[in-house]
Amino acid sequence: MSDADILRLIASLIFIVLLILGGAWATRRAGWLRSSQGQAIKVVGSQRLGAHSYISIVEVEGARLVVGIAGNQITLLHTMPPSTHSDATAELADPVGPASFASAFTQVLSRRHG
């Protein structure tokens, strides 16, 4: 084997390893490895409000909780009724797509205060 053949072999091995690492990163980033079965907590939606503050809708044992997350604090803002199977199928049947988190949050707040 000449030096060129050894260099080509090493370059090929490095390329294969990088390809495997890139595929693993893409799989993890896309969420293909995560399974929602058996998980007690499911994040339904989340919206960034500022540098370190978020508002999220979290589903726990069928109940939906609206929580505010800021720095080192998590605050329960509102408890919504559990979603029903018909709600989920209505969202899937909607040709425009599911409502955005902002519009859903505005509707919840208007029902609460209105």
Image (cartoon, rainbow, N blue to C red):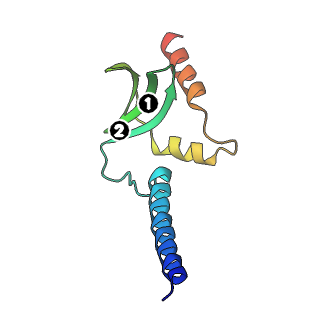
Badge 1 marks a residue whose secondary structure is strand
- Residue at image mark 1: 57
Estimate the x, y position of residue 42 in percent, counting from the top left: 38, 41
Determine which of the numbered discs, if any, sits on residue 79 in the image: none
User: For the point 47% across and 45% down, which residue is it?
Assistant: 85
Q: Residue furthest top?
A: 113
32 up-or-down from 112: above or below: below
30 up-or-down from 44: above or below: below
Q: Residue furthest front?
A: 3
Q: Residue furthest right?
A: 96
Q: Residue furthest bottom?
A: 1
* Residue sitting nearer the eye, 55 or 13: 13
In what quadrant of the picture does the C terminus appear? top right
60 up-or-down from 71: above or below: below
Which of the 4 quarters of the picture holds residue 61? top left
Which mark is first along the chain, 1 or 2? Answer: 1
Estimate the x, y position of residue 67 in percent, counting from the top left: 39, 24
Q: Do labels 2 and 1 touch, CB within 8 Å?
A: no
On screen, residue 110 versus residue 84, left or right, reads right
* Residue sitting nearer the eye, 39 or 70: 70
User: For the point 50% across and 81% down, which residue is it?
Assistant: 3
Badge 2 marks a residue whose secondary structure is loop
Name which residue type carries label 2.
Gly
Q: CA distance from mark 2 to mark 1?
A: 12 Å
Say few, some or many: other residues with alpha carbon within 10 Å of mark 2 (under 14 / 14 to 19 / 20 or more).
Answer: some
Which-is-in-front pick, marks 2 and 1? 1
- Residue at image mark 2: 62
20 up-or-down from 34: above or below: below
